[in-house]
Image: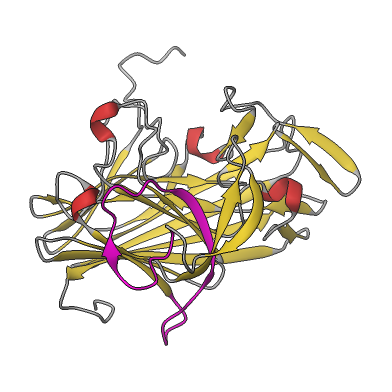
Amino acid sequence: MVRTGRLIASGEQVVLTAGDLTLTVVTVGGGMRQLTKGDWHVLDGYDPDEIPIGAYGQPLIPWPNRLADGRYTFRGHTYQVPLTEPDKGNALHGFARWETWGVLDCDVSRAVLGLDMYPRAGYPFALSVTIEYSVKPKSVSVVTTAVNAGRDPLPYAHGFHPYISVGTSQIDECELQMPAQTWFDTDARQIPIGRRSVKDSPYDFRAPRDIASTKLDTAFTDLSRDSDGMARVRLIGNNGREIAVAIDQTYRYVMAFTADTLHDVQRRRRSLGVEPMTAAPNALQSGDGLIVLEPGGSIRSHWAIEIGSRAERTPPD
C-alpha cells in the first residue's frame, strides 16, 4: 500500500498543557519543539516543517556533543560512524535525534515517547529508550530511561539540547549562573584537550553575572548542587524573568552555547543552549563519563526546566 498525503517534517505533534504552560513534543527526534508560557517563548523552538539543524530541543543519544573522526574502540573492537560535522571531522550528537519515536502513553500533561535503536554500522548494539515529559504550571520534567536490549555490553552517553530564553532580544542582556568549578579547554575541532579551573577565567559564572559579549560553546563539570541533589544553571533576564535548567546527579557535565556559530544568523545569541550531559564531549574515545550498560542494564536520568522570576530561588511546585 502506498501512503498518500504530506509528511510534516517534525512528525506527530504531542501537545501538553498545565495552566498557561504549553509544551509541544514531536515524534521526529523525540524532542521538544516548542515551550510557551502565555506569550513567552521559554524555548527558542522551530516550526513544524522546519529541520532543527542546531539540534533544537533534541535528545542526544547514544552520545552527546562531538566524537573525533567518528571513531572509537570498545571492548577491543574499533567502530566508525558517519561524520555529521565533516568540516571538523566529527560525528555530532548521536543518532536518536533523526529517528522516528513512538508515543507510548499520553494525557493532558504527560507523554511518554519511546525508541528502539537496532544495531547498525558503527554502533552494533540494541538500545531501548523512553523519554517521559511532564508539565506543571511552572516547570517541565524530562526523564530519560535507557535499557540495553541486546546480548552484549554497550557504551552509552546521553544529553539534551534545549535553547532557553527569558524573552529578551539577545542573551547579552541577561545574567548567567553556572555552578561549575571546571571548564574544558578544546582544540580547533572542539575536542577536549584539558580541564581548567573557572577561577580567573572568562568562564567563571559561579555567581550570576552578565553574559555581555562572552562567547560560549563550552563544556563544564564539577558541578555544585542544591540540597535536593540538583545542579541549576540559571538564565536571568533584566525583565524580571528567570529560567533554571535543573539536572540530577547522572548529569555530571553541562554545555553552554551562545549560538554564535549557527548557520541561521537571526538565531545567533537569541537564546542560550544549556545541554545536560552524562558524559564529556568525545566520551566514546576518552571514556570520560562513558556508561557501560550490561545486557538488561538500565539508567534513568532526570532534568527539568523551572520557570520563575528573579525573586524566586526555590524549585517551583
Q: Quadrant of residue 7?
A: top left
Quadrant where the C terminus is found in the figure: bottom left
Q: Quadrant of residue 124?
A: top right
Q: Residue furthest front?
A: 200
User: Where does the image place residue 137, in percent across and percent down from the top left?
Assistant: 18, 67
Magenta segment's dominant SS is loop
Q: Is residue 149 visible?
A: no
Q: Residue furthest bottom?
A: 227
Q: Residue at x 28, y 42 (%)?
A: 269
Q: Nearer the viewer, residue 38 or 64?
A: 64
Horizontally, residue 141 falls left or right of residue 148, namely left
User: How many labels sit on residues?
Assistant: 0
User: Where does the image place residue 70, in percent across and percent down from the top left?
Assistant: 70, 33
Magenta-span inclusion, residue 210: yes
User: Against 39, is 195 above or below?
Assistant: below
Q: Residue at x 8, y 50 (%)?
A: 39
What scheme was used to colour the molecule? secondary structure
User: Against 7, is 277 above or below?
Assistant: below
Horizontally, residue 231 falls left or right of residue 22, namely right
User: Where does the image place residue 8, in percent across and percent down from the top left?
Assistant: 31, 25
Q: Nearer the viewer, residue 10 or 110?
A: 10
Extent of the magenta region: 203-230
Horizontally, residue 157 falls left or right of residue 80, namely left
Q: Is residue 136 visible?
A: yes
Magenta-span inclusion, residue 164: no
User: Where does the image place residue 290, in percent across and percent down from the top left?
Assistant: 70, 57
Horizontally, residue 275 falls left or right of residue 147, namely left
